Image: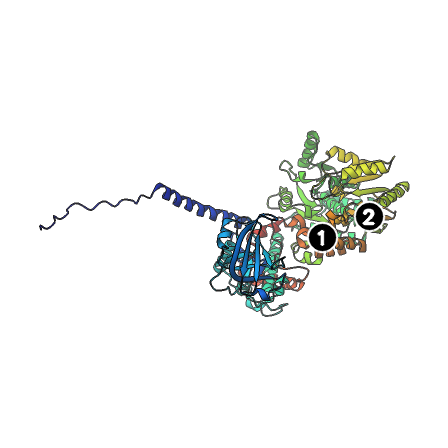
């Protein structure tokens, strides 16, 4: 047989493998799906604020599930959340009383029924007869056998975990399994090297603490032998480390902000040379006032005067209870500023409050020759142009208004003092915008912020540590004590009868409602209906209505009638919460008082008791099925009855709702404390306050790393 002829042809060229069209499409679709899933998960992480590895590491579990042990059904008690392992002996779809998947599990000691009201084909596949599964859920007593409703489940097999399973707060599109993996990855990658000098971790500590990596590792993967109570009350040494770190970061950032501000320049406001030969505007105003300042007003006035005469920007919070006389202190500060040849601006959160200030200040300052400009968003074009011209030329020494004061078209000739009333209602950006109105290069205006919500000591030491705080802690003479009564809504007729008697004595009455429209969720009487009902119940009496959706001109007309005593009863929403001052009003009725916050109730109560007549506040509450009186509401109403002291009210308010709502918009964009609790961690706060200046002075690099780890760029809010 002849040998085969060798193949001398060149080898075939390498060509791309051509997949069938449908296979290529599936591969491309899978790639797109993976990319999309990553993008969606990343967006979800961003929504939670988890952008850095350290953010993930500090995202601590809300709670834990114990998947480290298997419980025999015979040993499990009803009401317990347990993990069982057994074989599926039955799996069926039932249609009574509604469509559901019923599965029976036998663990050789007893049986248990699993019920799923919402289920997918994958549930049926995993829970098919003969499968061995692990199930975790709350065990309940059933009609035939014990049961679990919508338990977690998976196929049995593999070792049990050695740590509790963390459950994190999450958002849509971010499953727990993905989040757990992301958190542990962030923890592994994070630089958790020590940022607190070792000598400060070995002495003067309120409690023993762990190092940071040890603490975080433990809190994300705790062993099952640890008492869960120490996690829930945050008393475990791992939790103590996080409290210490967080409070130190806050104190460092606040102290650094204060030091940065100390390096800025501001005009020193001495009386101008032209005024030296005569009595200053400040002293002239004092002589013209129809009352004497209280000792507390005089004391805080000296604090402010001292600040204004320095070339460092004042950054002072003036706090005082409702009716303590903060406005006159602000007027005296404005007189100091104008006397030195500069302009002053006062910004209030609502037009009603701004107009109240405007009227008072005009009555005090115009006789001294000081011109005041008025700025609000509702002004007519001509009036607005005139005000803007007065401000730009410097003709207006004082400018009073709402948010309109910080609009771009408002140009001051020489602003040197910015006063912000009810400062917690303004955001960071708004306060910065007002401060930026100063035209002198490199200079900052002095800033005086006022609040009628006294700041509890622990908040003043933490969130307000960058401020100097002055307190008016006494009321002017002649203010009457307000009697507060909590009354069930069923006694409404008695309250209306009380209103009749007050009107007969020539007094006026407020009636405050929480809503102006019907709500499907909250069955509350609205202001419009109440106005109609009171008008019918009080024939011949002028009953007014005031709410935020009314045209500005109509609001002004209503308030003028009430201020002048023509209107006897004013039905209103919370737009009258601050600033309204009618000495003849002696009765405040608050509808559905259980729906209001404690601070808000106290503010509303402060609208009466401003004259010589005995005054009262009636807190009407409802206990119908839709609005049962809860423990928190009971605590608020009890506090209102027990004390008129705004400082005590503020302390209880902090206890009831924590610092978040209490702080309001001052913290807009700023991190609230996530781990420390100011009501129980006062010792750690004191430790952090003492250590912060030492860290900045002796370990500046460590201090910078510490703040960056905990706050990132969020410390910027302190500029305001």
**Name of the residue lying farthest toward the bottom:** 203
- Secondary structure of the residue carrying tag 1 is helix
**Name of the residue lying farthest toward the right:** 505
Q: Nearer the viewer, residue 585 or 499?
A: 499
Residue 458, x across and y down, in percent: 69, 58
Q: Nearer the viewer, residue 570 or 67?
A: 67
**Name of the residue lying farthest toward the top:** 382
Is residue 197 shown above or below 149? below
Cβ atoms under marks 1 and 2 closer than 8 Å? no
Q: Is residue 18 left or right of residue 460?
A: left
Residue 124, x across and y down, in percent: 50, 52
- Secondary structure of the residue carrying tag 2 is strand
Q: Which mark is residue 306?
A: 1
Is residue 521 shown above or below 152? above
Among numbered discs 1 and 2, the one appearing first in the sequence: 1
Name the front one of labels 1 and 2.
Answer: 2
The answer, for residue 461, to whether it is visible in the render is yes
Location of residue 656 (image quadrant): bottom right
**Alpha carbon distance from label 1 to label 2:** 43 Å
Q: Is residue 331 left or right of residue 53?
A: right
Instruction: Please tell me how crowded label 2 is: few (under 14), some (14-19), or many (20+) other residues with Cα within 10 Å.
Output: many
Q: Nearer the viewer, residue 511 or 105?
A: 105
Residue 433, x across and y down, in percent: 63, 43
Residue 9, x across and y down, in percent: 16, 45
Instruction: Please tell me how crowded label 1 is: few (under 14), some (14-19), or many (20+) other residues with Cα within 10 Å.
Output: few
User: Which residue carries the number 2 mark?
Assistant: 618
């Amino acid at each position: 047989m002849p040998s085969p002829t060798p193949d001398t042809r060149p080898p075939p060229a390498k060509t791309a493998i051509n997949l069938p069209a449908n296979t290529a499409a599936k591969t491309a679709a899978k790639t797109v799906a993976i990319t999309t899933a990553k993008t969606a998960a990343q967006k979800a992480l961003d929504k939670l604020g988890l952008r850095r590895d350290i953010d993930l590491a500090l995202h601590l579990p809300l709670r834990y599930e114990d998947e480290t042990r298997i419980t025999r059904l015979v040993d499990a008690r009803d009401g317990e959340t347990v993990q069982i392992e057994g074989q599926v002996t039955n799996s069926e779809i039932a249609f009574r009383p509604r469509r559901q998947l019923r599965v029976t599990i036998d663990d050789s000691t007893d049986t248990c029924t699993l019920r799923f009201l919402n289920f997918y084909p994958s549930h049926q596949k995993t829970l098919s007869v003969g499968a061995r599964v692990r199930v975790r859920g709350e065990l309940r007593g059933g009609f035939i056998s014990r049961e679990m409703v919508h338990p977690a489940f998976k196929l049995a097999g593999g070792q049990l975990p050695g740590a509790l399973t963390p459950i994190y707060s999450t958002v849509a599109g971010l499953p727990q399994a993905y989040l757990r993996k992301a958190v542990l990855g962030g923890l592994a990658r994070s630089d958790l090297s020590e940022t607190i000098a070792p000598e400060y971790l070995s002495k003067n500590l309120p409690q023993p603490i762990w190092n940071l990596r040890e603490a975080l590792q433990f809190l994300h993967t705790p062993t099952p032998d640890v008492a869960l109570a120490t996690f829930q009350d945050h008393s475990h040494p791992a939790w103590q480390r996080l409290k210490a770190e967080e409070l130190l970061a806050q104190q460092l950032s606040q102290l650094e902000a204060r030091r940065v501000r100390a390096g800025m320049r501001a005009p020193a406001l001495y009386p101008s040379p032209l005024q030296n030969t005569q009595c200053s505007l400040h002293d002239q105003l004092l002589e013209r006032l129809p009352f004497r300042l209280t000792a507390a007003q005089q004391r805080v006035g000296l604090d402010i005067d001292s600040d204004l005469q320095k070339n460092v920007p004042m950054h002072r919070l003036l706090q005082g209870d409702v009716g303590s006389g903060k406005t006159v202190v602000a007027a005296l500060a404005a007189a100091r500023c104008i006397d030195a040849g500069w302009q002053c601006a006062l910004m209030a959160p609502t037009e009603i409050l701004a107009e109240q200030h405007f009227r008072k200040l005009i009555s005090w300052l115009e006789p001294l020759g000081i011109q005041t400009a008025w700025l609000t968003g509702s002004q007519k074009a001509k009036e607005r142009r005139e005000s803007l011209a007065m401000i730009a030329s410097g003709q207006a020494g004082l400018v009073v208004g709402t948010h309109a004061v910080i609009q771009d078209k408002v140009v001051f000739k020489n602003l040197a003092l910015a006063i912000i009333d009810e400062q917690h209602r303004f955001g960071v950006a708004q306060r910065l915008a007002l401060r930026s109105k100063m035209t002198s290069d490199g200079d900052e205006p002095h800033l005086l912020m006022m609040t009628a919500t006294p700041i509890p000591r622990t908040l003043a030491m933490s969130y307000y540590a960058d401020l100097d705080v002055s307190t008016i802690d006494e009321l002017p003479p002649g203010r009457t004590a307000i009697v507060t009564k909590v009354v069930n809504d069923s006694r409404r007729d008695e309250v209306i009868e009380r209103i009749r008697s007050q009107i007969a004595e020539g007094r006026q009455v407020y009636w405050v409602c929480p809503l102006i429209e019907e709500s499907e969720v909250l069955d509350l009487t609205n202001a419009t209906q109440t106005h109609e009902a009171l008008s019918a119940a009080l024939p011949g009496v002028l009953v007014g209505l005031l709410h935020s959706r009314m045209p500005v001109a109509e609001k002004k007309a209503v308030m003028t009638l009430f201020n002048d005593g023509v209107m006897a009863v004013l039905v209103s929403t919370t737009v009258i919460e601050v600033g309204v001052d009618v000495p003849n009003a002696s009765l405040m009725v608050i509808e559905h008082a259980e729906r209001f916050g404690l601070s808000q109730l106290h503010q509303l109560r402060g609208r009466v008791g401003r004259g010589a007549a005995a005054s009262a506040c009636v807190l009407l509450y409802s206990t119908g099925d839709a609005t049962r009186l809860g423990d928190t509401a009971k605590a608020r109403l009890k506090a209102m009855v027990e004390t008129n002291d705004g400082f005590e009210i503020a302390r209880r308010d902090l206890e009831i709702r924590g610092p978040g709502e209490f702080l309001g918009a001052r913290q807009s964009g700023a991190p609230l404390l996530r781990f420390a609790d100011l009501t129980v961690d006062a010792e750690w706060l004191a430790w952090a306050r003492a250590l912060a200046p030492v860290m900045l002075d002796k370990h500046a690099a460590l201090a910078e790393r510490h703040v960056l780890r905990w706050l990132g760029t969020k410390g910027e809010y302190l500029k305001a």
